[in-house]
Amino acid sequence: MLKRRLYLQIYLTIIASLVLLVILSAVLWELFGRDRMDRDYLSSASIFVSMALPPADAPVAEQQEAIALLGRELDIAIALFDSRGELLASHRDVDMPSARRTAEPGWHRTRHGSVLSLVLPDGRWLIADPHEDDRPAPILSLLFMLGLVAVCVGLAALPLVRRLTKRLEQLQRGVERIGAGDLSARVAVKGRDEIAQLAESFNNAAEKIEKLVGAHRLLLANASHELRTPLSRIRLGLEMGQGRPTPERRTALKQDIAELDALIDEILLMSRLDAQDRVDGSQRVDLVALAAEECARYDEASLTGTAPEVPGDPRLLHRLLRNLLENAEKHGAPPIEIEIGTEDGMATMTVSDGGGGIAEADREKVFQPFYRGADRQNVNGYGLGLPLVRQIAEAHGGTAALIDRTRKRSAIKVSLPLSRREQGRPRE
């Protein structure tokens, strides 16, 4: 369907206004121009008048009688002059134009209105004065018509302008509500032009802001709760070791500090990933080499498959795979397998283990920060591993999700986009 572009609406409005202006100009021409400019009509009128009058050499009395009869029949003032400008006959007082324009055919302005001058074929000329003193001056009529044109154009443009500005005002109110803290503010999307696209973009941005702020609030609330546990243990250890702390106490304190440092590091990494849309993809990462390096840390982890290099951040991708392996080790059972391949222009990494899998109700919740299943409350960790996996994957333009396996019930698949060059290369 043709999109109703804003510039097209404005352009069509201008075209319609111009068409209206042309029509009204034609009316003005009919009222003020045609009877003055059409010389053919004036010439024909001169011939008819000469036929109604006696010849130029007729007695003056005869010409006066003919002029009086013509004036009475037409109810106008008439004056007849010879070719030298001498008055031959008249009927009532005629408002004469200036001498310079007297013998010129056409309508002429006088102090009290307009008079018609006709030059007869025999050289005589006639002045006809309608005496319509109550008729408005042509200039006033012209100004009235131009004003009418302006009003019509204004009325034609008003609905469209009001429609556009009303939607802009709705957008302004939506922005003000967002600025006032109402993150649920949305605006109605009407039409298919740029303003409708702007309203849709505003709604999408408002939804992302609401989700981001909500996630940050949840993260802050959960982080403050989780930070209390290692801090309490550190405080208790310091109080108990005020004299001479035992080696076991020192080791426990170091573990608590390391745990606290790791938790803060994960929280800061999540915040940094939230703050940026995409990571720097200028580097090319060999997933096979990366997976082999991480698998070397585990005794019962194996690697199969190949895939082209992907653009991304090596440090973040190391963190992604490490979190997957740690999650499989903590919550699953050996053996741990990593399968690397390509699918629909994406490089895929599937980490699976021999554990019992994740309950259907928890399949999306495991990607929420600080979430741990009911049967995993006593397992070490804070529930940030898989949320970081999904954040890192999405920061690279990919996805992370749980999948169903036939042999192993626990598997997480990460898909990362290949470079454009690798997408166009045929698979071997």
Image: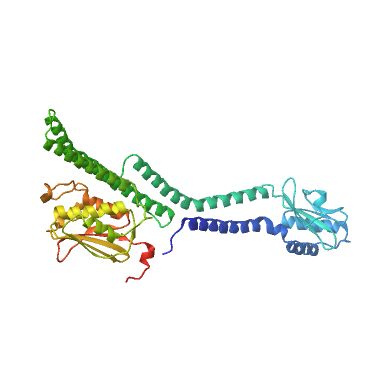
How many labels, in total?
0
**Is residue 15 found left or right of 187 in the rendered image?**
right
Query: How far across and down, in percent of the image, does residue 148 sit?
Result: 57, 51
Q: Is residue 187 visible?
A: no
Q: Relative to 11, is 366 on the left or the right? A: left
Name the residue at the top extreme.
243
- Residue 343: image x %, image y %? 29, 66
Image position of 254 (left or right of 172)? left
Q: Nearer the viewer, residue 397 or 332?
A: 332
**Residue ID at (60%, 58%):** 22
- In this view, the residue in front, 297 or 113, is 297
Q: Residue at x 40, y 52 (%)?
A: 198
Q: Position of residue 46 (x, y in %)?
A: 78, 62
Residue found at x 14% / y 61%: 409
- Which part of the image, by quadrant, shows the N terminus? bottom left
- The scheme the figure's colours follow is rainbow
Picture quarter with the C terminus: bottom left
Residue 345 placement: quadrant = bottom left
| Residue 234 seen in render | yes
Q: Residue 407: percent from the left, percent from the top?
A: 14, 66
The front one of 266 and 143 is: 266
